[in-house]
């Protein structure tokens, strides 16, 4: 787990860095029994992917409820990853310098139809670390739901984590955001009534998307409404429908319902987190108000707060590549300083 | 139409004002043929209610798409009105001093299944004025959709209106708010697929409600989520479901769809409005951004801008009784000054 300056330069080198080749990513599944907070003991499995050379410090990377273990495209698994902008050769998280571990969320395949607490996800990650023989993570970088799980991991497994970067996710679900998600779940239920969960899930995804973005983005992007064949069609409608359909094709309604619920179960006392945390918030986030991030940073024993501005709101971590790269680079350099200071 | 100082004191009297008794409200229906902007000539009807003594200056009062002609309870029609807080004896709009005219929106009964432009509503109001022999309105006080229609009325019928008060509604539908409404209409369509429009409409109403309110209100009001019988139940869920069911009981799905669409058709050049306008905005409004109100006020030839703060957001006109009363009192006093100056 040590992170020596020769492998991870603390500052940009004057001469080109000559890295080792990126080894193939590996994938696997951990089967285990978990004591779920609200559903008792359950047999479960967690699928993981690990990218980067053996011996490098390990970072756990986790995104929103629709993110998965495939963070970045690579030689072994060349499909696009959900965070290709940040993970890859020459990117903020370079697998020649760090190992990137990620999981498919507990429940992501729809086979676990029970309330899943973010704390359960944190425990599931600990089981994956056990299975992989990883004593501790150098860092946990979580965005959205991943930030919530990261906070739970830091609170529950403090000796297994050096530093947390929590982007656009906090110690609680805001009651307004919870209401928004509850209505998404109602949409799925409405579809299920007619044995057509796809339409319900597509609507739910569109509603979620609205909460991820901002009026500023929509104003810059979409035209005013028009009348088409006797109906009013608004500018964003085709885009939203397309996103809804794409989501339905790759998502189990049960997985959506249980992971959406899981966000609403987030509850944690920041005072109990004994790990250093970078709290990253976006001022325009309509789902996770910046006030909650401020409250989190104020209540954590050891925290730094970064407030970004983005007209992508909650989705900034997926869209503001440069700003997020800078946040991650700063986070990594702090990990290194911690290491050197230790 | 004249408004003499003896009938409407310009300042609070030192001695109690002794008013005439409030005459009964009257109701009626105007049948007419309208040239709808997007649907051609159509036979239509507009139901109206008029409260206050003959000879007093007439104010048109209009609220959101779910508001109707029954603004306030009175002797003739004693059911609660949608703006009892502002209209009534001793209230900001006192029917002993002004006559209050209001309509059921064109399409509100669900019999007009066609695109309805806010301009069509303005023309419908002009037909009601014709039928009632009212040459001009002393004022038009519109909130939400009513403000949009008020702007159209001012643009299309400037000689029939002295002054407009446009609360929480502007010259355009914001593309983000339009997307939000389009998804509400999708919810109705999803319900209709299974011949159960009620569930779809109930979900649509709940989604609308979220857009009318703010995270600050929900945070102050609702508890964190709980697990109940294996499902996650969020704090606002019972409240929202109750509101949805109440709405379904009194609303035709077709009316909702057509009036929701109508909001999205709002488009008007403020430079063409030759009537003085009080633009009233709420900083926390998530549906009508205060930036749009500022743009409207800046583009209108003769406007004043008032920005209120309220954790009720778009619904402030229904909830912030004192602040709205002050806005209305100021509006009326300006109407009077205009009269005196003329």
Image: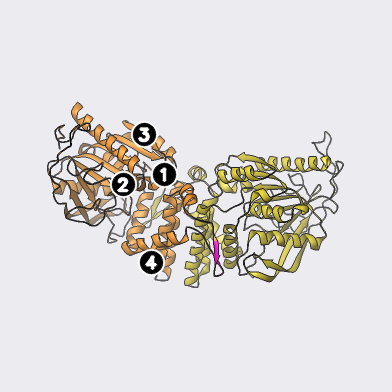
Chain colours: A yellow, B orange
Say which quarter of the image contains residue B290: top left
Name the spot of residue A203 as percent of width and height, x first: 50, 60
**Mark found first going from the N terminus, 3 or 2:** 2
Name the spot of residue B224 as percent of width and height, x first: 54, 57
State how far apart marks 4 and 3 are (Cα): 40 Å
Q: Secondary structure at mark 3?
A: strand
Q: Are marks 4 and 3 in contact (CB under 8 Å)?
A: no
Residue identified by numbered label 3? B305
**Residue A216 placement, left or right of A77:** left
Residue identified by numbered label 4? B198
x 61%, y 68%: residue: A114
State how far apart marks 1 and 2 are (Cα): 13 Å
Instruction: Name the subunit of mark 3.
Output: B
The answer to whether B200 is drawn above or below residue B325 in the figure is below
Q: Are marks 2 and 4 in contact (CB under 8 Å)?
A: no
Name the spot of residue B40 as percent of width and height, x first: 27, 53
* The one of B328 and A222 positioned closer to us in this rendering: B328
Instruction: Name the subunit of mark 2.
Output: B
Say which quarter of the image contains residue B91: top left
x 28%, y 49%: residue: B83
**Mark found first going from the N terminus, 4 or 3:** 4
State how far apart marks 1 and 3 are (Cα): 14 Å
Residue identified by numbered label 1? B288
Secondary structure mostly taken by the magenta-highlighted segment of the chain: strand
State how far apart marks 4 and 1 are (Cα): 27 Å
**Mark found first going from the N terminus, 2 or 4:** 2
**Residue B44 placement, left or right of A11:** left
| Residue located farthest toward the front when viewing the structure as drawn | B15
- The residue range painted magenta reads B226-235
**Mark found first going from the N terminus, 1 or 3:** 1
Instruction: Name the subunit of mark 4.
Output: B
Residue identified by numbered label 2? B146
């Amino acid at each position: 787990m040590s992170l020596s300056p020769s492998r991870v330069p603390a500052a940009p080198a004057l001469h080109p860095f000559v890295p080792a080749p990126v080894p193939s990513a590996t994938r696997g599944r951990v089967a285990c029994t978990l004591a779920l907070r609200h559903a008792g003991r359950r047999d479960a499995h967690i699928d993981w992917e690990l990218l980067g050379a053996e011996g490098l410090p390990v970072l756990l990377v986790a995104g929103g409820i629709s993110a998965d273990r495939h963070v970045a495209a690579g030689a072994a698994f060349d499909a696009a990853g959900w965070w290709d902008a940040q993970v890859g050769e020459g990117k903020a998280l370079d697998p020649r310098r760090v190992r990137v571990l990620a999981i498919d969320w507990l429940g992501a395949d729809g086979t676990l139809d029970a309330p899943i607490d973010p704390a359960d996800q944190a425990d599931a990650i600990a089981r994956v670390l056990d299975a992989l023989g990883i004593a501790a993570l150098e860092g946990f970088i979580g965005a959205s739901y991943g930030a919530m799980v990261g906070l739970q991991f830091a609170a529950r497994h403090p000796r297994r984590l050096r530093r947390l970067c929590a982007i656009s996710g906090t110690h609680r679900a805001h009651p307004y955001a919870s209401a928004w998600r509850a209505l998404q779940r109602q949409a799925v239920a409405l579809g299920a009534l007619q044995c057509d969960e796809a339409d319900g899930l597509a609507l739910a995804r569109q509603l979620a998307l609205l909460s991820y973005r901002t009026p500023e983005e929509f104003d810059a992007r979409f035209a005013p409404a028009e009348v088409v064949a006797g109906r009013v069609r608004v500018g964003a409608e085709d885009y939203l429908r397309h996103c809804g359909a794409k989501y339905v094709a790759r998502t189990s309604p049960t997985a959506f319902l249980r992971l959406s619920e899981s966000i609403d179960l987030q509850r944690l006392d920041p005072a109990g987190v004994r790990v250093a945390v970078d709290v990253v918030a976006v001022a325009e986030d309509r789902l996770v108000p910046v006030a909650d991030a401020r409250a989190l940073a104020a209540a954590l024993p050891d925290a730094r707060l970064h407030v970004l501005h983005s007209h992508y709101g909650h989705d900034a971590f997926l869209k503001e590549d440069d700003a997020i790269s800078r946040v991650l680079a700063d986070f990594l350099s702090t990990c290194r300083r911690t290491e050197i200071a230790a």
